[in-house]
Image (cartoon, rainbow, N blue to C red):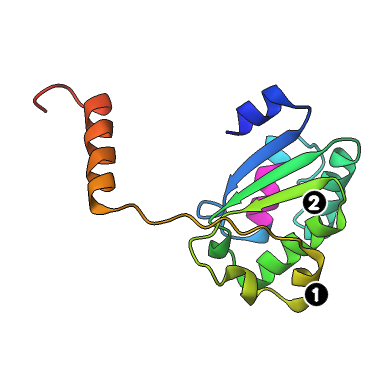
Amino acid sequence: MVAALEKKTRIQSAYVNCWNNPSCHSVLDALCHEFRILGAEARSVPHKLNKLHAAFAKDIVVLILDEIDRLPLRDRNDLLYAWAEAGNVGVVALSYRRDSYLQLDKRVRSRLNPLPVPFKAFTRSETEEILRSRAAEGLLPDA
């Protein structure tokens, strides 16, 4: 998805799985690594944010934060507040829980302009079809 976005537009993007990066520091580290930002090795969140803001200053950037509800609430607030201040950074925050947005600090919510996109759960038959398809692609016959 990220590569397709970059091919069709001049928008830079990055995907961070918050399940694998469950803190503000590790999300920022992943972003610094993804955008090849040097000098962001310091452990300070403000330092990393300043480096990222400077790197994004001339571009439009979309950050995809998958499983954002995995982050502690304070970290979610800090990250979303920081990116809401940058006029050229869009955030796609994916969450399993519907109430993730409502848990955010009021100051953060007032800066965001969210567009919730609910996804229905797969039915049993849809799940079975997905598994059959994946097994056909990933396993040898009669495995």
Mark 1–mark 2 distance (CA, rounded to whole Å) = 22 Å
Q: Residue furthest left?
A: 142
Residue 138: mark in rendering: none
Number of on-image labels: 2
Of helix, strand and loop, which one carries label 2? helix
Q: Residue 30 in magenta? A: yes
Identity, as a three-letter code, of the amino acid under mark 2: Lys
Q: Quadrant of the N terminus?
A: top right
Write down the region rendered in magenta: 25-31
Q: Is residue 67 left or right of residue 32?
A: left
Q: Residue 92 in magenta? A: no
Residue 48: mark in rendering: 2
Q: Please provide percent x and percent y for residue 15.
A: 61, 42
Residue 107: mark in rendering: 1
Identity, as a three-letter code, of the amino acid under mark 1: Arg
**Above or below: residue 94 compared with residue 58:** below
**Above or below: residue 66 compared with residue 114:** above
Q: Quadrant of residue 94?
A: bottom right
